[in-house]
Image (cartoon, rainbow, N blue to C red):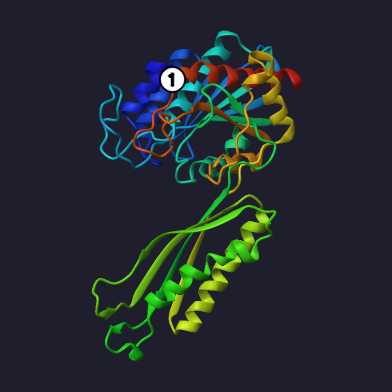
């Protein structure tokens, strides 16, 4: 498992470009002896089937396989060989854990039922899960429940976090463009000023959460880009801002979009600028089914004891596992990747998956699948 994980780490591929990664996964699945391998599902997705000894229910296990556009720090023997591409979120480890679970389930097949292994591309773009669903994932490979596992820095290595509340946020992106004819800085009365409009928008948008969202709800609106102009004495014709809106409830999600649009329209009118807004819905919140979350805790308690169940705050980070859990009941667990000052954070150039948790993660996935099938015979 370590060798396989580090091989994937050395050869990362960006979202939507995981052809070699998918081929390596398919080859390994054939080598370990799964019953069927289906390739090119929703792009570079792989689905593998492991049948139990008797017919029964079906359960899905999912891992993501793509990497990030980042430059890894130097010095690791298994460091990325690709410039500005690295596994900075642990998807190499997720894939290796699912492969390890597959091997366990083949060595000792479930008494009944079917396990559907889902190796999903393009999670970092939020497009991999919906693409696989659109390609008939659940119609072609129906499951009664779906489980996944994400490593989590800041949690003791090998401990698990299982949430009963929505624990990863919905994520929507937007781009606002204020436009005018442009002009000279010495004659501002001859044109509207998109920089002024952008400045007003930066300030006003901060009031959306504090003055429009119920304090009992959690939401955030952040701007990550503001681009306009090149010279000190020219009023530019365009100011462009990009941001993200995140929350946990669909009602709040709609309210955020409505207020971003209203604020942008009002500022455009007040400043005399034209305005365009592209609001791009991305991933829904990740919400565990309560029965599936309970099953996960039962597995952890039975195999490692209640001390291995940790508490950790929910995250405003997003994951397109939310699409899958909208379509079928399931649970997305977190496994600790390590804590302390030396533990690297996700999406950072010094990040690396903790190989010490590979065995426990794979055993958890295999055991969850077994227990679900035994409980639903």
* Mark 1 element type: helix
Left or right of 95: which side holds 238?
left
Q: Is residue 63 placed above or below 258 in the rendered structure?
A: above
Dividing the picture into quadrants, the one containing residue 49 is top right
| Observer-nearest of 339 and 332 | 339
**Residue 57 visible in this rendered orientation of the protein:** no
Residue 305 at what x, y percent from top left? 66, 16
Outermost residue toward the front?
A: 341
Left or right of 270: which side holds 20?
left
Q: Is residue 119 placed above or below 170 in the rendered structure?
A: above
Residue 244 at what x, y percent from top left? 49, 56
Residue 334 at what x, y percent from top left? 57, 30
From the image, tell me which residue sits under label 1: 355
- Quarter holding the N terminus is top left
Q: Residues within 10 Å of mark 1 (few under 14, many from 20)?
A: some
**Residue 266 visible in this rendered orientation of the protein:** yes
Residue 377 at what x, y percent from top left? 76, 19
Q: Residue at x 60, y 61 (%)?
A: 209
Q: Is residue 161 placed above or below 134 in the rendered structure?
A: above
Say how many tags the image has.
1
Q: Residue at x 44, y 85 (%)?
A: 272
| Observer-nearest of 27 and 238 | 238
Dividing the picture into quadrants, the one containing residue 145 is top right
Dividing the picture into quadrants, the one containing residue 212 is bottom right
Q: Residue at x 54, y 17 (%)?
A: 360
Q: Residue at x 33, y 41 (%)?
A: 70
């Amino acid at each position: 498992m370590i060798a396989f994980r580090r091989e994937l780490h050395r050869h990362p591929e960006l979202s939507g470009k995981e052809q070699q990664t998918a081929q390596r996964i398919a080859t390994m699945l054939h080598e370990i002896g799964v019953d069927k391998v289906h390739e090119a599902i929703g792009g570079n997705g792989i689905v593998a089937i492991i049948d139990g000894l008797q017919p029964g229910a079906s359960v899905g296990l999912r891992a993501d396989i793509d990497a990030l556009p980042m430059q890894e720090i130097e010095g690791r023997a298994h460091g990325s060989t690709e410039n500005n591409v690295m596994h900075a979120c642990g998807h190499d480890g997720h894939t290796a854990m699912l492969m390890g679970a597959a091997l366990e389930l083949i060595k000792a097949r479930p008494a009944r039922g079917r396990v559907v292994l889902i190796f999903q591309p393009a999670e970092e773009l939020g497009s991999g899960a919906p693409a696989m669903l659109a390609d008939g994932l659940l119609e072609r490979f129906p499951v009664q429940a779906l489980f996944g596992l994400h490593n989590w820095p800041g949690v003791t290595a090998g401990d698990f976090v299982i949430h009963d509340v929505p624990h990863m946020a919905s994520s929507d992106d937007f781009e606002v463009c204020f436009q005018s004819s442009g002009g000279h800085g010495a004659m501002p009365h001859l044109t509207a000023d998109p920089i002024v409009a952008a400045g007003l928008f930066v300030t006003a948008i901060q009031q959306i959460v504090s003055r429009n969202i119920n304090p009992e709800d959690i939401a955030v609106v952040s701007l990550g880009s503001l681009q306009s102009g090149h010279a000190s004495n020219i009023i530019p014709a365009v100011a462009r801002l990009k941001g993200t809106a995140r929350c946990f409830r669909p009602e709040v999600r709609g309210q955020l979009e409505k207020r971003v649009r209203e604020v942008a329209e009002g500022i455009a009118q007040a400043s005399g600028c034209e305005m365009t807004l592209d609001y791009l819905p991305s991933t829904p919140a990740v919400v565990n089914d309560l029965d599936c979350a309970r099953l996960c805790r039962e597995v952890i308690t039975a195999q490692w004891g209640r001390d291995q169940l940790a508490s950790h705050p929910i995250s405003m980070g997003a994951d397109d596992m939310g699409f899958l859990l909208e379509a079928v009941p399931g649970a997305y667990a977190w496994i600790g990747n390590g804590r302390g000052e030396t533990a690297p954070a996700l999406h950072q150039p010094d990040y690396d998956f903790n190989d010490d948790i590979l065995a426990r993660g794979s055993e958890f996935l295999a055991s969850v699948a077994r227990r679900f099938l035994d409980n639903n015979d």
